[in-house]
Amino acid sequence: MVLRNDYREFDRLTARVFDTATRNAGARLDAYRDGDTFVIDIDLPGVDPAGIDISVDRKVLTVRAERKRAEREGVKYVVAERPTGAVSRQVFLSESLDTDRLEARYENGVLNLSIPVTEKAKPRKFEVAGV
């Protein structure tokens, strides 16, 4: 029964993530649970990793970054379709996540956030004592 509750909680969380107003304007993301870790992968191509700002306030994760176009003297763009400017994304996190142990990595234009599930939220087994 614990597993069923975990899936219900995950469905509720993903519904909140994907139904945000910034869905089409913000950075695209995937969110999933991998064992005892909740993972969020956010596409941030062309962003300097040193300029990525990640914060959690009352279980609201906010990621801010800025895409800049390299300015080169004498260059006039004929086509400039790659988006530039500020990008932000907010995700409402479950109470069952340990945000104090959040880990962030940036590789190949993707910000990977790993957040462990709290011990109290992990499924537990109980033994039945005989009489």
Image (cartoon, grey):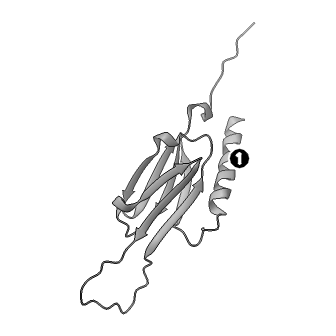
- x and y percent of residue 112 in the render? 44, 54
Look at 69% across and 35% down and name the residue there: 2
Question: Which of the 4 image quarters holds residue 65?
Answer: bottom left
Q: Nearer the viewer, residue 22 or 106?
A: 22
Above-or-below relation of 97 to 27 = above
Q: Check the image and name the residue furthest to the top.
A: 131
Report the side of 36 relative to 77 (left or right): right
Whether residue 44 appears in this view of the structure is no
Above-or-below relation of 58 to 21 = above
**Residue underneath mark 1:** 8
Above-or-below relation of 107 to 6 = below
Question: Which of the 4 image quarters holds residue 1?
Answer: top right
Look at 26% across and 83% down and name the residue there: 72
How packed is label 1: few (under 14 Cα within 10 Å), some, or many (20 or more)?
few
Look at 48% across and 57% down and name the residue there: 41
Q: Check the image and name the residue furthest to the front.
A: 57
Q: Nearer the viewer, residue 2 or 48?
A: 48
Hey, what amino acid is under mark 1?
A: Arg
Q: How many marks?
A: 1
Look at 42% across and 61% down and name the residue there: 110
Above-or-below relation of 105 to 117 = below
- x and y percent of residue 62 in the render? 52, 57
- x and y percent of residue 87 in the render? 48, 68
Report the side of 13 relative to 77 (left or right): right
Quarter of the image where the C terminus is located: top right
Q: Check the image and name the residue furthest to the right.
A: 131
- x and y percent of residue 51 in the render? 37, 62
Element under label 1? helix
Whether residue 68 appears in this view of the structure is yes
Q: Nearer the viewer, residue 74 or 29?
A: 74
